[in-house]
Amino acid sequence: MRPQSTVDWIAFVFLLIGAFSWGYFVTDVNLLDQLLERIWDPLDDVVFVLIALSGLYWLVRVFMPARGPSDAGERREGGRR
């Protein structure tokens, strides 16, 4: 599923950051912690929360069907056949 809106793209970027962060975490290097603690100590915690929220957003987006006017129209047309 490809990101379609601005919120989709923002969440997708945070997911990529989280994926690379986990890759470094497995090797005992917390890259986000090292980079963001220099700016502001709680900033890395904020970014990890945003990564978690992005993951939840994408889980809902991928596994929950979209409900909108286009779906209702398709259902009505399918029932007329």
Image (cartoon, rainbow, N blue to C red):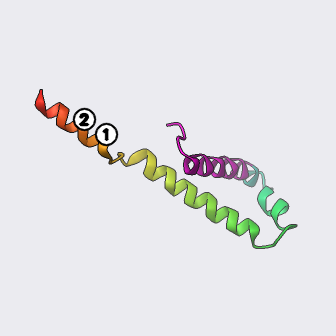
The front one of 58 and 9 is 9
Tag 1 secondary structure: helix
Q: Which residue occupies the extreme top position in the image?
A: 81
The front one of 8 and 37 is 8
Q: CA distance from mark 1 to mark 2?
A: 6 Å
The number of numbered discs placed on residues in the rendered structure image is 2
Residue drawn 65% across and 48% down? 13
Residue drawn 36% across and 46% down? 66
* Residue 81 place in picture, x, y as percent: 12, 26
Magenta stretch, main secondary structure, is helix
Count residues near mark 1 (Cα–Cα under 10 Å), then give few for <14, some for 14-19, many for 20+.
few
Tag 2 secondary structure: helix
Q: Quadrant of residue 51?
A: bottom right
Residue drawn 11% across and 31% down? 80
Q: Which segment did they paint magenta?
A: 1-23
Residue 12 on the magenta span: yes
Which residue is labeled 1 in the image?
Answer: 70
Count residues near mark 2 (Cα–Cα under 10 Å), then give few for <14, some for 14-19, many for 20+.
few
Q: Which residue occupies the extreme left position in the image?
A: 80
Left or right position of 25 against 7: right
Residue 79 on the magenta span: no
For residue 4, which numbered disc appears in the image?
Answer: none
* Residue 32 place in picture, x, y as percent: 77, 59
Circles 1 and 2 in contact, beta carbons < 8 Å: yes
Q: Which residue occupies the extreme right position in the image?
A: 38
Q: Amino acid at mark 1?
A: Ser
Q: Is residue 15 above or below residue 40?
A: above
* Residue 22 place in picture, x, y as percent: 69, 52
Q: Quadrant of residue 48?
A: bottom right
Left or right position of 71 against 76: right
Q: Amino acid at mark 2?
A: Glu
Which residue is labeled 2 in the image?
Answer: 74
